[in-house]
Image (spheres, rainbow, N blue to C red):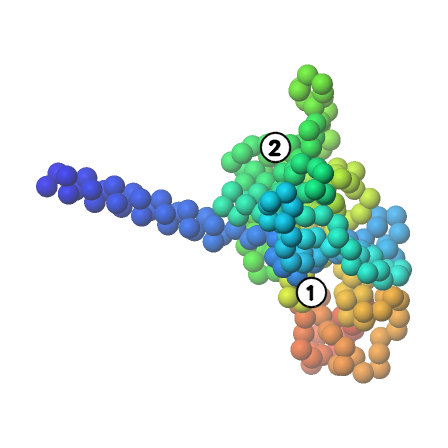
Amino acid sequence: MKHKVLLRLVMLSLFMAFCVGSSAQEDYEPFIKTGKTWYCMDEEDENIIFCYMVSGDTVINNTKYAKILFRNCTPKVSEWEFFAAMREDVENRKVYYLKSQFENERLMYNFNLEEDGSYFYEEKCGWEYYDSKWVVVKNINRRFYEYVWFYVDENDERSSIIGLDFFIEGIGFQYNPIDIDTWPNSFCRFVACFENDECVADANNFYPSRENTERINKVLGFIQTGINNINSDAPENDSARSIYSLDGRRLQQVPEKGVYIVNGRKMVRK
């Protein structure tokens, strides 16, 4: 009898552990998804927009990676070109980055930072966990991380603290979320991230501001028109164009009333 009770307790414990583990994985929003696109803007010239896109798989050094493509969007649209390769360990919530077959891969993102405490994305530079919380980003629960940048000296002791910064699970860093070689002093800002033509995050999810809203509208204008001049006038028949709400949702038609965006401009129907 005692053995049966003990066996039941063991099985119950294993079942609960499985449920917790499964729930933890279900809660995680992956960073790498085919077709996912990040739009960024030059900090000094906001007429310069460029983007990165996840496009299929490749094999490098016998390891499967997702291909990350890059292109300039404005002032002149360029062809997509290979930028880097990434792979994701979903179970441990980590993203690895590889620029070429001649380099070693680097740990780019650790979305399990609250448990691991800190990590290095380069030999002498890393992130230390400060705080995290759950936030709702475009109707999806994601972890919002606060962390501290730090350098270490030749004796592996921390020689300087750069400051507090942020990234969002599945979205990345608030400046350039893809080009790890520009960290921490990136020359651009993240503006918006899209999956299946839907905006899943934008700069206002890091900190809302009028400047961020203007940047988002410019990117939406480029996506809608698909032309070089993102500041062109709105078409007379805007119902023939892609239409977006203020929070980046694609609309099927012009709303009966309210504010919406066409060609990067706010339009109002009363």
Image disc number at residue 198: none
Tell me the amino acid under the disc marked 1: Gly
Which residue is more in the foreground, 59 or 42? 59
Circle 2/circle 1 CB separation < 8 Å: no
Q: CA distance from mark 2 to mark 1?
A: 33 Å
Q: Is residue 6 left or right of residue 175?
A: left
Image disc number at residue 119: 2
Residue at image position (60%, 45%) is 62
Which residue is more in the foreground, 69 or 189? 69
Residue 148 visible to the viewer = no
Q: Position of residue 214 (x, y in %)?
A: 80, 59
Residue at image position (61%, 32%) is 119
Residue at image position (70%, 37%) is 103
| Res 244 → quadrant | bottom right
Task: Reply above or below: 141 against 121.
Answer: below
Q: Nearer the viewer, mark 2 or mark 1?
A: 2
The secondary element bearing badge 2 is classed as strand
Task: Reply above or below: 207 against 227.
Answer: above
Label 1, on which residue? 248
Q: Position of residue 46 (x, y in %)?
A: 86, 54
